[in-house]
């Protein structure tokens, strides 16, 4: 046997290391994405924007380009020769730089363009990250692994609230954008040094054994694979309606505490950021654990917690927005926030288990396309337009009444998560490890 043939292929990195690096990246992803929510009211006053323009700035400006670029970037990530770690690092540089540029905007158009740039960069992160995690995590631990990665959502949002609110009160909203954007450029260098695509081990092994690379699915084959799953289609509707609710509520709840309860951006960021962030972290971890724990008994139970959680959150949310004391409102909102976060791990892990490994990044991108276009893009915009529409009747309470309606929407994702659960025993993890 030749010396080359006797060489061992490099071992893939541990799941723990990959998850830790990706979690930090995802924290910056959501910090840069969601900080605009806590800064929306100071920006509105400074630039003289309407509620509809706030909805455009916080939602559709980001989501339109994020969703449009997400699928072709995911197809690139699914190619066996693609370095997904390098792809994530490059995307991080783009979205961090564009976040910093948001602080230089002098009018609505410039701010809109900068937010579009943030969406362009962030489109390269999550599909590639989900594909990496699914390659390393065994099916019985995949929901917990996805939930751990998804902790970037509440942690990043919490930090955006805290840092953005305090900086806005002390130095202005422009400084806040710059301070949170610049560190991401340096983080990208750390990603290049620390993260290695596990495909490199497989490629080295194939080089020794002269085995060919796995065949890349065509666009038509990948879409047929994804949309051929009835469970995936139901999950697509469930996840999209959940995102419509959560993104819309997140934007307008921060504005609600400032406009209705008279809190400053810093006060809202501190109190709502901590309470909501801790509740979402607890819900995200619990959702992943419950899915793995009870999914072993019956795959249908992977989606039980999300279905029950969204239904229970409806009356709790209405009660919270009804409160006239902001302290009681914050305390009550912790429960529906936790319940609404139960779906992250079960949802994203199920997506990876419903398709072949060669279509995993594409499957994540399709779900993210729908979630961000409908949820992040239309949620804040729809609720902003609704607030403007009812303002002549509701006056200063227009946002409160909009949030009542947003709470009731929670029954929609609850029903579709339940319908998805009925298909999981038949479809989940039948396409590969």
Image (cartoon, helix red, strand yellow):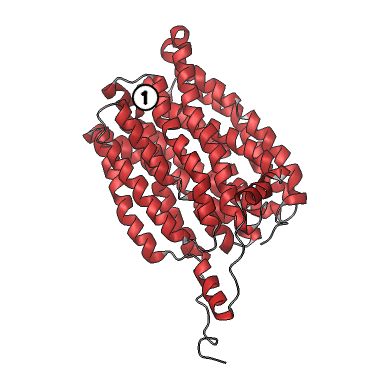
> Residue 10, percent across and down?
50, 76
Screen quadrant of the N terminus: bottom right
The residue depicted at 35 percent of the width and 61 percent of the height is 190
When the figure is inspected, residue 387 is found, relative to residue 240, above or below; the finding is above
* Left or right side of 413 for 255: left
Q: Say which residue label 1 marks.
A: 258
> Residue 149, percent across and down?
50, 52
The residue depicted at 54 percent of the width and 21 percent of the height is 404
Q: Nearer the viewer, residue 76 or 326?
A: 76
Look at the numbered disc 1 and give the secondary structure of its residue: helix
The residue depicted at 62 percent of the width and 56 percent of the height is 217
Q: Would residue 308 be seen by someone viewing this image from the given angle?
A: yes
Q: Furthest residue to the top?
A: 393
> Residue 360, percent across and down?
59, 54
Q: Nearer the viewer, residue 425 or 129?
A: 129
* Left or right side of 116 for 297: right
> Residue 45, percent across and down?
29, 22
Q: Nearer the viewer, residue 1 or 246?
A: 1
Q: Furthest residue to the left?
A: 171
Q: Furthest residue to the bottom?
A: 1
């Amino acid at each position: 046997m030749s010396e080359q043939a006797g060489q061992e292929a490099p071992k893939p990195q541990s799941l723990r290391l990959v998850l830790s690096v990706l979690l930090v990246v995802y924290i910056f992803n959501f910090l840069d994405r969601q900080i605009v929510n806590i800064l929306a009211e100071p920006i509105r006053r400074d630039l003289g924007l309407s509620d509809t323009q706030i909805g455009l700035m916080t939602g559709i400006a980001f989501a339109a380009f994020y969703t449009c670029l997400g699928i072709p970037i995911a197809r690139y990530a699914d190619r066996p020769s693609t370095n997904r770690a390098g792809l994530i690092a490059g995307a991080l540089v783009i979205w961090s730089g564009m976040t910093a540029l948001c602080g230089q905007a002098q009018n609505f158009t410039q701010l809109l363009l900068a937010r579009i740039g943030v969406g362009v960069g962030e489109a390269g992160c999550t599909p590639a990250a989900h594909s990496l995690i699914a390659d390393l995590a065994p099916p019985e631990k995949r929901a917990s692994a996805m939930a751990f990665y998804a902790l970037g959502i509440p942690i990043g949002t919490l930090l955006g609230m805290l840092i953005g609110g305090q900086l806005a009160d002390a130095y202005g909203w422009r400084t806040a954008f710059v301070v949170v954007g610049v560190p991401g450029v340096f983080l990208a260098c750390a990603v290049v040094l620390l993260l290695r695509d596990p495909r490199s081990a497989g490629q080295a092994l194939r080089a020794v054994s002269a085995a060919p690379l796995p065949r890349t699915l065509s666009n038509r084959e990948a879409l047929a694979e994804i949309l051929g799953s009835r469970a995936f289609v139901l999950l697509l509707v469930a996840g999209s309606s959940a995102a419509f609710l959560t993104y819309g509520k997140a934007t307008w709840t921060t504005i609600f505490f400032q406009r209705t309860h008279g809190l400053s951006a810093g006060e809202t960021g501190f109190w709502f950021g901590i309470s909501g962030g801790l509740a979402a972290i607890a819900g995200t971890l619990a959702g992943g654990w419950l899915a793995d724990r009870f999914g072993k008994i019956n795959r249908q139970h992977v989606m039980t917690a999300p279905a029950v959680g969204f239904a229970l959150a409806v009356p709790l949310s209405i009660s919270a927005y009804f409160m006239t004391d902001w302290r009681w409102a914050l305390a009550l909102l912790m429960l529906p926030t936790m319940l609404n976060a139960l779906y992250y791990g079960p949802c994203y892990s199920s997506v990876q288990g419903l398709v072949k490994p060669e279509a995993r990044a594409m499957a994540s991108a399709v779900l993210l396309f729908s979630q961000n276009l409908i949820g992040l893009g239309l949620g804040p915009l729809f609720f902003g337009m609704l607030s403007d529409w009812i303002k002549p009747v509701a006056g200063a309470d227009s946002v409160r009444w909009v949030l009542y309606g947003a709470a009731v929407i929670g029954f929609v994702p609850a029903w579709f998560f339940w319908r998805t659960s009925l298909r999981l025993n038949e479809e989940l993890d039948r396409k590969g490890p």
